[in-house]
Image: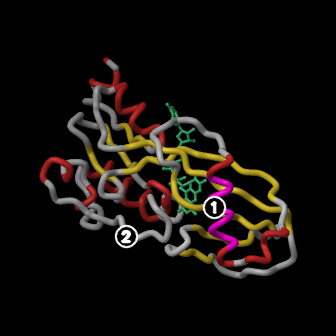
Amino acid sequence: MKQLRDLSKQKIGVVAAGHSSVIANMAGLKLPLESKPLQALVSEPVKPIIDTVVMSNAVHAYVSQSDKGELVIGAGTDDYVSYSQKGSHDIVEGTLNAILELYPIFSRMRMLRQWGGIVDICPDASPIISKTSIKGLYFNCGWGTGGFKATPGSGDLFAHTIANDEPHKLNAAFNINRFVSGDLVDEHGAAAVAH
Ligand SMILES: Cc1cc2nc3c(=O)[nH]c(=O)nc-3n(C[C@H](O)[C@H](O)[C@H](O)COP(=O)(O)OP(=O)(O)OC[C@H]3O[C@@H](n4cnc5c(N)ncnc54)[C@H](O)[C@@H]3O)c2cc1C
Protein backbone atom coordinates (compact mmCIF):
# COMPACT_ATOMS: atom_id res chain seq x y z
CA MET A 1 0.00 0.00 0.00
CA LYS A 2 2.88 2.35 0.80
CA GLN A 3 4.20 1.92 -2.76
CA LEU A 4 0.75 2.61 -4.23
CA ARG A 5 0.41 5.79 -2.18
CA ASP A 6 3.63 7.27 -3.63
CA LEU A 7 3.06 7.49 -7.37
CA SER A 8 4.74 10.84 -7.92
CA LYS A 9 7.01 9.47 -10.68
CA GLN A 10 4.84 6.75 -12.18
CA LYS A 11 1.35 6.04 -13.37
CA ILE A 12 -0.72 2.92 -12.79
CA GLY A 13 -3.84 2.05 -14.77
CA VAL A 14 -5.99 -0.65 -13.21
CA VAL A 15 -8.30 -2.74 -15.42
CA ALA A 16 -9.26 -5.65 -13.18
CA ALA A 17 -13.05 -5.87 -13.79
CA GLY A 18 -14.70 -7.82 -10.94
CA HIS A 19 -11.60 -7.50 -8.75
CA SER A 20 -11.19 -3.72 -9.14
CA SER A 21 -12.39 -3.11 -5.58
CA VAL A 22 -9.84 -5.59 -4.24
CA ILE A 23 -7.00 -3.64 -5.85
CA ALA A 24 -8.50 -0.27 -4.87
CA ASN A 25 -8.59 -1.46 -1.26
CA MET A 26 -4.80 -1.98 -1.41
CA ALA A 27 -4.49 1.77 -2.02
CA GLY A 28 -7.07 2.67 0.62
CA LEU A 29 -9.65 3.60 -2.02
CA LYS A 30 -13.30 2.57 -1.84
CA LEU A 31 -14.94 2.21 -5.24
CA PRO A 32 -18.73 2.51 -5.71
CA LEU A 33 -18.93 -1.02 -7.14
CA GLU A 34 -20.68 -4.27 -6.38
CA SER A 35 -19.01 -7.48 -7.59
CA LYS A 36 -21.45 -10.22 -8.57
CA PRO A 37 -21.23 -13.54 -10.43
CA LEU A 38 -22.51 -13.64 -14.01
CA GLN A 39 -23.09 -17.07 -15.50
CA ALA A 40 -23.32 -18.40 -19.04
CA LEU A 41 -23.78 -21.84 -20.54
CA VAL A 42 -23.03 -23.57 -23.81
CA SER A 43 -24.88 -26.38 -25.60
CA GLU A 44 -23.59 -29.25 -27.67
CA PRO A 45 -22.72 -28.09 -31.22
CA VAL A 46 -25.44 -28.16 -33.87
CA LYS A 47 -25.67 -27.05 -37.49
CA PRO A 48 -26.20 -23.31 -38.11
CA ILE A 49 -29.58 -22.22 -36.74
CA ILE A 50 -29.14 -18.59 -35.52
CA ASP A 51 -26.96 -15.99 -37.29
CA THR A 52 -27.45 -13.16 -34.78
CA VAL A 53 -27.75 -12.57 -31.05
CA VAL A 54 -31.32 -12.89 -29.83
CA MET A 55 -31.99 -11.00 -26.58
CA SER A 56 -35.29 -10.63 -24.78
CA ASN A 57 -36.08 -8.27 -21.95
CA ALA A 58 -39.51 -9.87 -21.68
CA VAL A 59 -38.24 -13.34 -20.78
CA HIS A 60 -34.84 -12.06 -19.67
CA ALA A 61 -32.26 -14.13 -21.53
CA TYR A 62 -30.07 -14.14 -24.62
CA VAL A 63 -28.80 -16.76 -27.07
CA SER A 64 -26.37 -16.80 -29.99
CA GLN A 65 -24.48 -19.50 -31.87
CA SER A 66 -20.71 -19.80 -31.93
CA ASP A 67 -18.70 -20.63 -35.06
CA LYS A 68 -18.31 -24.15 -33.65
CA GLY A 69 -22.11 -24.52 -33.59
CA GLU A 70 -22.61 -24.30 -29.82
CA LEU A 71 -25.49 -22.20 -28.53
CA VAL A 72 -24.16 -19.60 -26.08
CA ILE A 73 -26.85 -18.79 -23.52
CA GLY A 74 -27.03 -16.38 -20.62
CA ALA A 75 -29.17 -13.99 -18.60
CA GLY A 76 -28.63 -11.53 -15.73
CA THR A 77 -26.26 -11.56 -12.79
CA ASP A 78 -26.71 -13.65 -9.67
CA ASP A 79 -28.74 -11.81 -7.03
CA TYR A 80 -25.97 -11.63 -4.46
CA VAL A 81 -22.54 -10.03 -4.07
CA SER A 82 -19.80 -12.67 -4.31
CA TYR A 83 -16.39 -13.53 -5.73
CA SER A 84 -17.41 -17.14 -6.32
CA GLN A 85 -16.66 -17.99 -9.96
CA LYS A 86 -18.91 -20.98 -10.42
CA GLY A 87 -22.25 -21.95 -11.88
CA SER A 88 -25.40 -22.90 -10.03
CA HIS A 89 -28.47 -25.01 -10.89
CA ASP A 90 -31.08 -22.33 -10.22
CA ILE A 91 -29.53 -20.01 -12.80
CA VAL A 92 -29.38 -22.78 -15.42
CA GLU A 93 -33.01 -23.66 -14.76
CA GLY A 94 -34.25 -20.06 -14.85
CA THR A 95 -32.21 -19.15 -17.93
CA LEU A 96 -33.26 -22.23 -19.89
CA ASN A 97 -36.91 -21.75 -18.93
CA ALA A 98 -36.66 -18.26 -20.43
CA ILE A 99 -34.93 -19.50 -23.60
CA LEU A 100 -37.59 -22.20 -24.05
CA GLU A 101 -40.24 -19.49 -24.07
CA LEU A 102 -38.50 -18.22 -27.22
CA TYR A 103 -37.44 -21.54 -28.75
CA PRO A 104 -39.39 -24.54 -27.35
CA ILE A 105 -37.48 -26.88 -29.71
CA PHE A 106 -34.28 -26.21 -27.72
CA SER A 107 -35.70 -28.42 -24.94
CA ARG A 108 -34.11 -31.29 -26.89
CA MET A 109 -30.61 -29.75 -26.72
CA ARG A 110 -28.03 -30.99 -24.24
CA MET A 111 -25.89 -28.47 -22.41
CA LEU A 112 -22.14 -29.04 -22.43
CA ARG A 113 -20.82 -26.68 -19.77
CA GLN A 114 -21.51 -23.56 -17.72
CA TRP A 115 -19.27 -21.05 -16.00
CA GLY A 116 -19.39 -17.92 -13.89
CA GLY A 117 -17.23 -14.82 -13.89
CA ILE A 118 -17.29 -11.78 -11.61
CA VAL A 119 -18.64 -8.53 -13.01
CA ASP A 120 -18.22 -5.08 -11.43
CA ILE A 121 -21.39 -3.01 -11.34
CA CYS A 122 -21.77 0.69 -10.58
CA PRO A 123 -24.99 1.98 -8.98
CA ASP A 124 -25.86 3.81 -12.24
CA ALA A 125 -24.81 0.83 -14.42
CA SER A 126 -22.23 2.96 -16.26
CA PRO A 127 -18.46 2.43 -16.24
CA ILE A 128 -15.75 4.45 -14.52
CA ILE A 129 -12.84 5.62 -16.73
CA SER A 130 -11.14 8.05 -14.43
CA LYS A 131 -8.23 9.32 -12.44
CA THR A 132 -8.59 8.97 -8.67
CA SER A 133 -7.82 10.96 -5.56
CA ILE A 134 -4.38 9.30 -5.58
CA LYS A 135 -2.12 11.04 -8.09
CA GLY A 136 -1.01 8.66 -10.83
CA LEU A 137 -3.61 5.98 -10.07
CA TYR A 138 -6.34 5.43 -12.67
CA PHE A 139 -9.25 2.99 -12.90
CA ASN A 140 -11.19 1.63 -15.86
CA CYS A 141 -13.94 -0.49 -14.30
CA GLY A 142 -17.65 -0.83 -13.66
CA TRP A 143 -18.41 -2.36 -17.07
CA GLY A 144 -20.69 -4.94 -15.53
CA THR A 145 -22.07 -7.41 -18.04
CA GLY A 146 -21.00 -5.43 -21.11
CA GLY A 147 -17.26 -4.87 -20.97
CA PHE A 148 -15.81 -6.80 -23.86
CA LYS A 149 -17.83 -5.17 -26.59
CA ALA A 150 -16.54 -1.82 -25.30
CA THR A 151 -12.89 -2.84 -25.06
CA PRO A 152 -11.40 -0.93 -28.06
CA GLY A 153 -13.12 2.36 -27.20
CA SER A 154 -12.62 2.14 -23.46
CA GLY A 155 -8.94 1.23 -23.88
CA ASP A 156 -8.34 4.18 -26.17
CA LEU A 157 -10.03 6.64 -23.81
CA PHE A 158 -8.29 5.15 -20.79
CA ALA A 159 -4.90 5.56 -22.49
CA HIS A 160 -5.77 9.18 -23.26
CA THR A 161 -6.80 9.79 -19.65
CA ILE A 162 -3.58 8.31 -18.27
CA ALA A 163 -1.32 10.10 -20.76
CA ASN A 164 -2.92 13.53 -20.20
CA ASP A 165 -4.01 13.12 -16.57
CA GLU A 166 -7.34 14.45 -17.85
CA PRO A 167 -10.26 12.64 -19.47
CA HIS A 168 -11.08 12.81 -23.16
CA LYS A 169 -14.37 14.65 -23.69
CA LEU A 170 -16.01 11.29 -24.48
CA ASN A 171 -15.26 9.87 -21.02
CA ALA A 172 -15.42 13.08 -19.00
CA ALA A 173 -18.88 12.13 -17.68
CA PHE A 174 -17.62 8.71 -16.56
CA ASN A 175 -15.46 10.09 -13.76
CA ILE A 176 -15.42 8.71 -10.26
CA ASN A 177 -16.59 11.99 -8.72
CA ARG A 178 -20.06 11.62 -10.20
CA PHE A 179 -20.97 9.53 -7.17
CA VAL A 180 -20.21 12.58 -5.02
CA SER A 181 -21.61 15.29 -7.30
CA GLY A 182 -24.72 13.32 -8.24
CA ASP A 183 -24.16 13.73 -12.00
CA LEU A 184 -24.95 10.08 -12.61
CA VAL A 185 -25.13 8.45 -16.05
CA ASP A 186 -28.09 6.16 -15.54
CA GLU A 187 -27.91 3.27 -18.02
CA HIS A 188 -30.01 0.71 -16.16
CA GLY A 189 -32.40 0.38 -19.08
CA ALA A 190 -29.69 0.05 -21.75
CA ALA A 191 -29.19 -3.71 -21.68
CA ALA A 192 -31.62 -6.46 -22.61
CA VAL A 193 -30.54 -8.38 -19.52
CA ALA A 194 -30.20 -7.01 -16.01
CA HIS A 195 -26.86 -5.65 -14.88
C1 LIG B 1 -20.43 -15.10 -18.20
C2 LIG B 1 -20.10 -13.73 -18.73
C3 LIG B 1 -20.66 -13.31 -19.91
C4 LIG B 1 -20.35 -12.04 -20.44
N1 LIG B 1 -20.91 -11.66 -21.61
C5 LIG B 1 -20.59 -10.47 -22.16
C6 LIG B 1 -21.12 -10.10 -23.42
O1 LIG B 1 -21.89 -10.83 -24.05
N2 LIG B 1 -20.74 -8.90 -23.94
C7 LIG B 1 -19.88 -8.07 -23.28
O2 LIG B 1 -19.56 -7.00 -23.80
N3 LIG B 1 -19.37 -8.38 -22.06
C8 LIG B 1 -19.70 -9.56 -21.49
N4 LIG B 1 -19.22 -9.91 -20.26
C9 LIG B 1 -18.45 -8.91 -19.50
C10 LIG B 1 -17.02 -8.88 -19.95
O3 LIG B 1 -16.47 -10.18 -19.93
C11 LIG B 1 -16.22 -7.96 -19.01
O4 LIG B 1 -16.89 -6.72 -18.83
C12 LIG B 1 -14.85 -7.70 -19.63
O5 LIG B 1 -14.18 -8.93 -19.84
C13 LIG B 1 -14.03 -6.81 -18.73
O6 LIG B 1 -12.79 -6.62 -19.38
P1 LIG B 1 -11.56 -6.11 -18.58
O7 LIG B 1 -10.41 -6.09 -19.53
O8 LIG B 1 -11.95 -4.84 -17.89
O9 LIG B 1 -11.35 -7.20 -17.43
P2 LIG B 1 -10.98 -8.76 -17.55
O10 LIG B 1 -11.02 -9.23 -18.96
O11 LIG B 1 -11.82 -9.48 -16.52
O12 LIG B 1 -9.49 -8.74 -17.10
C14 LIG B 1 -9.14 -8.39 -15.78
C15 LIG B 1 -7.82 -9.05 -15.51
O13 LIG B 1 -7.34 -8.60 -14.25
C16 LIG B 1 -6.71 -9.68 -13.64
N5 LIG B 1 -6.62 -9.44 -12.19
C17 LIG B 1 -7.62 -9.46 -11.27
N6 LIG B 1 -7.14 -9.19 -10.04
C18 LIG B 1 -5.81 -8.99 -10.18
C19 LIG B 1 -4.76 -8.67 -9.29
N7 LIG B 1 -4.99 -8.52 -7.97
N8 LIG B 1 -3.52 -8.54 -9.78
C20 LIG B 1 -3.27 -8.69 -11.11
N9 LIG B 1 -4.23 -9.00 -12.00
C21 LIG B 1 -5.47 -9.14 -11.55
C22 LIG B 1 -7.57 -10.88 -13.99
O14 LIG B 1 -6.85 -12.09 -13.87
C23 LIG B 1 -7.91 -10.58 -15.44
O15 LIG B 1 -6.98 -11.13 -16.33
C24 LIG B 1 -19.49 -11.18 -19.72
C25 LIG B 1 -18.92 -11.61 -18.51
C26 LIG B 1 -19.22 -12.87 -18.02
C27 LIG B 1 -18.62 -13.31 -16.70
Q: Is 38 left or right of 8, judged from the image as shown?
A: right
> Within the image, what quadrant is residue 153 found in?
bottom left
Q: Is 8 left or right of 187, judged from the image as shown?
A: left
Q: Position of residue 182 (x, y in %)?
A: 15, 55
Q: How many marks?
A: 2
Question: What coloring was used for the rendering?
Answer: secondary structure
Quarter of the figure that contains the N terminus: top left
The circle on residue 189 is: 2
* 94 falls in the magenta region: yes
Residue 84 seen by the camera: yes
Identify which residue is drawn at 45% across, 45% down: 15
Quarter of the figure that contains the C terminus: bottom left
Q: Residue furthest left?
A: 181
Q: Position of residue 118 (x, y in %)?
A: 53, 44
Identify which residue is drawn at 36% across, 56% down: 127
The circle on residue 95 is: 1
> Mark 2 vs mark 1: which is more N-terminal?
1
Q: Majority secondary structure of the magenta segment?
A: helix
Amino acid type of the residue tagged 2 in the rendering? Gly
* 22 falls in the magenta region: no
Residue 16 seen by the camera: no
> Within the image, what quadrant is residue 106 found in?
bottom right
Residue range (magenta): 91-100
Along the line of sight, the residue nearer the viewer: 13 or 189:
189
Identify which residue is drawn at 32% across, 43% down: 138
Q: Position of residue 170 (x, y in %)?
A: 29, 67
Amino acid type of the residue tagged 1 in the rendering? Thr
Q: Position of residue 109 (x, y in %)?
A: 83, 67
Q: Secondary structure at mark 1?
A: helix
Q: Secondary structure at mark 2?
A: loop
